Image (tube, rainbow, N blue to C red):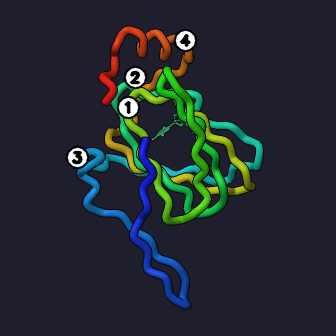
Amino acid sequence: MEIIKFPTVLSKFGMLSYFQDFADYFSEIKRIYYICGVKKGIRRGMHAHKELEQITFCPYGTIRFRLDDGLSKEEIILNEPNKGLYIGKGIWREMYWEEDNSVLVVAASMLYDENDYIRDYETFLSMVKSGYWVRK
Ligand code: TYD
């Protein structure tokens, strides 16, 4: 997990943020998806990925992330358009919508593949224990 601050151009016409040259995180963005139309109080996620890596941000609203590497948990709030979050492989994530209609955008290192998901927490923990992911 790493917080990323996107470069931002502010003017009287608004705020423009961007990210580029993200090779420190993964080699290629293969997919972009976004989640909208979510009511406050909704929880999403509740899964980990075997290989997928993501950079995610919330350009509108407030979304709280609970991230768990199987050993420790941490919470990160995305509530600024220029604040991004890198999530590596093998991280259990839960996202809590703190405001109606908060938007979550995700740039992902792989195409969608349901086989890459781990949707059962006990399975996730046993994979962590077996050393499935080498932690830095
Ligand atoms: P999921 O990743 O489980 O979303 P969340 O963790 O936010 O609840 O995806 C929800 C559904 O959408 C699931 O049926 C898979 C499908 N989906 C795709 O078809 N393509 C995609 O790129 C993504 C991210 C999800």
Find out if the beta carbon at label 4 lies less than 8 Å from the nearest ligand 1 atom.
no
Of labels 3 and 2, the one closer to you: 3
Q: Can you tell which mark lies on residue 27? A: 3
Q: Which residue is drawn at 42% across and 46% down?
A: 2
Q: Identify the mark nearer the N-term, 1 or 3.
A: 3
Packing grade of label 2 (10 A; few <14, some 14-19, many >=20) is few
Task: Measure the C-alpha gap from mark 4 to mark 2.
Answer: 17 Å
Q: Name the residue under label 2.
A: 115
Disc 3 secondary structure class: loop
Packing grade of label 3 (10 A; few <14, some 14-19, many >=20) is few
Disc 4 secondary structure class: helix
Task: Measure the C-alpha gap from mark 4 to mark 1.
Answer: 17 Å
Disc 1 secondary structure class: loop
Viewed as shown, does residue 97 lie left or right of 129? right
In the rendered structure, are the residues bearing label 4 and label 2 in contact, judged by CB atoms less than 8 Å apart?
Answer: no
Quarter-of-image position of residue 65: top right
Q: Residue 41 at x, y = what percent? A: 77, 43
Q: Identify the mark nearer the N-term, 4 or 3.
A: 3
Task: Measure the C-alpha gap from mark 1 to mark 3.
Answer: 14 Å
Q: Identify the mark nearer the N-term, 1 or 2.
A: 1
Q: Mark 1 points at which residue?
A: 89
Q: Name the residue under label 4.
A: 122
Of labels 4 and 2, the one closer to you: 4
